């Protein structure tokens, strides 16, 4: 803090006149300089001992890791590769990519590693018959499976039918001691099957106990059994319990639900009027003893009234429980349409199939598809509103990525809406998000498939061996599982929306979204053959999602700057040719 004395500045005098703090500072500076010189010499000797073609040895000697940890040796090697020959650079990048693939944790399908949670969750349904419990169970299974959690349903009614008691009448559901004891015995047996399955799972998972569970006594038994399972000696994973109660007092919804119940195994082949009378009597038996979930039970619960009209949650603080309650708080049964469309053909897409989202402007064929997409959405939306008897001023919500081809594909729809005189003239609500962009190729982004196959064959083989979990090496590189993970907010928005929605995306994103609505197995997602030049119309229903494909631009239809040309005539194969095929 004090200025250096003149004796230190001028060499004519020695350091004898310096103070003790100044001498310490000088000593530390000299030591630091010596350490730097030693480190520089050691690094030079190390680099001379490892030629450029021995990057694996260099990486391991310096203790480097993957690109995600940005080891200094990785950065040095990547910068050095820019000055090497093209062949050597390709070889270097491939070696580093393979090293990353060997060390990076790409199997996000193991839900046990999701945000560090190792919790196992039991979801116990609560509610009278025909109140929408089965619908909610299907929604939960579809969502939890899509995000990567193992999930299984344990239905007491199905266990009863497997044990030869299908077709039970209303008397079976009576409140006498014998009938209650029989049903409780089945419930206990179903619980044991459930906990056997939970013990076999090595990470976070969800078991759904699908029964009415309409009394406090039954729910107390479930809570005590769950607590006993968590306290088992030698267990490392806790088991949590949350009740999901479905309440419905809408007469129209109840009428539809009652009619659907007549199709289950208990009423197969029976007269509809007789079956309806018996089912109503069964519901009355349950109503006589029904006790809604209350705070006094000191449990975690999610209570839904008329599926989407009202949601009440309590003590849903765990990771899995909070995710589940948030999802259920957004689902509803309002009628709507969801249209999935790939972006129009781009110039770079036509020239060569590129990895990543940088796909340039639209070709004449892409522009023609965009024009036809606008016309289709307008017509289909108007038809849907008329069929459902909905107000004709409802607008379409448009969700896209923020790539150039996304904006170009939806532009005709926006422009047509602004100039249309009818009630549908309101602008569609267009929202863009990078969450809907294409799967990122990392260091391989912008390369064509042929280039990767030729220059990085080992990396390509790794990808083809497991397309679901393969993550492209480099900063931002993604796998299909990564895309699913970043699409969670989009999916919640789709479930929340009560308006019809158009999504314009790239192929990988569309595959992931389509797989959720159709319940596609995760391993099949990267191979879904979704059509270009077409719109997939999804209609969510209590029984699942109905899918209809509308082809707007056939593959054999030629389009140039002058507009579309008629397709070439198709040659009809002869009888022998058809037989051979």
Image (cartoon, rainbow, N blue to C red):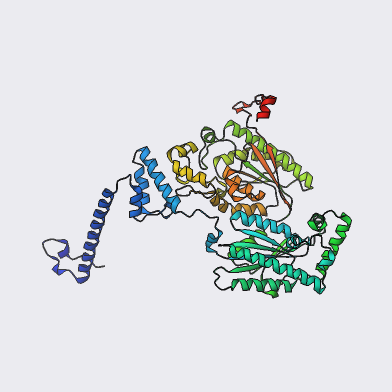
Quarter of the figure that contains the C terminus: top right
Quarter of the figure that contains the N terminus: bottom left
Q: Vertical placement of 252 versus 231: above or below?
A: above
Residue 191: x %, y % from top left: 68, 67
Residue 471: x %, y % from top left: 49, 49
Q: Residue 189 is drawn in which quadrant?
A: bottom right
User: Which residue occupies 38% across, 44% down?
Assistant: 92
Specify whether residue 322 is in view.
Answer: no
Residue 55: x %, y % from top left: 35, 48
Residue found at the very far left of the displayed protein: 12
Horizontal arrangement in the rendering, residue 185 relative to residue 277 (left or right): left
User: Which residue occupies 42% across, 53% down?
Assistant: 66
User: Considering depth in this image, is 303 or 147 the residue closer to the camera?
Assistant: 147
User: Considering depth in this image, is 213 or 312 the residue closer to the camera?
Assistant: 213
Horizontal arrangement in the rendering, residue 400 relative to residue 455 (left or right): right
Specify whether residue 44 is in view.
Answer: yes
User: Which residue occupies 64% across, 62% down?
Assistant: 207
Residue 184: x %, y % from top left: 74, 70
Q: How many marks?
A: 0
């Amino acid at each position: 803090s004090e200025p250096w004395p003149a004796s230190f500045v001028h060499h004519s005098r020695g350091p004898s006149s310096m103070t003790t703090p100044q001498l310490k500072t000088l000593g530390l500076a000299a030591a630091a300089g010596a350490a730097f010189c030693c480190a520089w010499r050691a690094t030079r000797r190390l680099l001379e001992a490892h030629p450029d073609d021995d990057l694996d040895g260099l990486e391991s000697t310096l203790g480097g890791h993957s690109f995600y940890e940005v080891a200094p040796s990785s950065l040095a090697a990547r910068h050095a590769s820019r000055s090497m020959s093209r062949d050597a650079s390709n070889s270097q990048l491939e070696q580093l990519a393979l090293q990353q693939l060997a060390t990076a944790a790409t199997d996000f399908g193991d839900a046990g590693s999701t945000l560090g949670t190792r919790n196992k969750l039991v979801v116990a349904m609560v509610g009278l018959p025909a109140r929408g419990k089965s619908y909610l169970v299907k929604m939960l299974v579809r969502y939890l499976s899509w995000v990567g959690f193992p999930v299984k349903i344990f239905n007491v009614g199905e266990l009863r039918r497997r044990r030869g008691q299908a077709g039970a009448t209303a008397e079976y559901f009576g409140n006498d001691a014998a009938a209650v004891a029989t049903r409780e015995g089945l419930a206990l047996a179903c619980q044991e099957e459930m906990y056997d399955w939970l013990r076999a799972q090595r990470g976070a998972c969800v078991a759904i106990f699908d029964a009415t569970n309409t009394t406090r006594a039954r729910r107390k038994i479930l809570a005590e059994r769950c607590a006993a399972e968590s306290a088992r000696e030698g267990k490392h994973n806790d088991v949590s319990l949350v009740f999901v109660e479905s309440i419905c007092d809408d007469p129209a919804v109840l009428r539809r639900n009652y009619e659907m119940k007549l199709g289950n195994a208990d009423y197969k082949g029976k007269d509809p009027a007789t079956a309806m009378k018996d089912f109503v009597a069964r519901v009355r038996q349950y109503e006589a003893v029904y006790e809604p979930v209350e705070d006094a039970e000191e449990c975690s619960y999610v209570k839904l009234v008329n599926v989407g009209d009202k949601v009440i949650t309590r003590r849903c603080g765990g990771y899995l429980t909070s995710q589940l309650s948030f999802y259920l708080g957004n689902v509803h049964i309002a009628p709507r349409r969801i249209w999935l469309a790939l972006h129009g053909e781009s110039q770079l897409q036509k020239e060569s199939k590129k990895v990543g989202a940088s796909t340039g402007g639209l070709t004449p064929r892409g522009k023609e598809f965009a024009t036809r997409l606008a016309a289709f959405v307008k017509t289909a939306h108007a038809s849907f509103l008329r069929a459902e008897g909905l107000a004709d001023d409802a607008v379409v919500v448009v969700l896209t990525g923020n790539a150039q081809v996304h904006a170009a594909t939806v532009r005709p729809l926006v422009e047509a809406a602004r100039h249309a005189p009818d009630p549908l003239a309101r602008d569609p609500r267009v929202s863009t998000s990078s969450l809907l962009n294409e799967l990122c190729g990392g260091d391989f982004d912008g390369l064509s498939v042929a280039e990767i196959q030729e220059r990085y064959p080992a990396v390509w083989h790794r990808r083809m061996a497991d397309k679901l979990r393969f993550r492209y090496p480099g900063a931002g590189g993604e796998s299909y599982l990564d895309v699913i993970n970043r699409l969670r907010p989009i999916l919640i928005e789709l479930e929340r929306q009560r308006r019809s929605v158009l999504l314009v995306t790239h192929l990988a994103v569309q595959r992931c979204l389509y797989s959720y609505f159709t319940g596609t197995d995760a391993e099949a997602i990267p191979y879904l053959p979704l059509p270009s030049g077409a719109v997939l119309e999804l209609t969510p229903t209590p029984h699942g999602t109905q899918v209809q494909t509308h082809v707007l631009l056939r593959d054999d239809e030629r389009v140039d700057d002058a507009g579309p040309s008629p397709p070439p005539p198709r040659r009809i194969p002869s009888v022998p040719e058809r037989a051979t095929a």
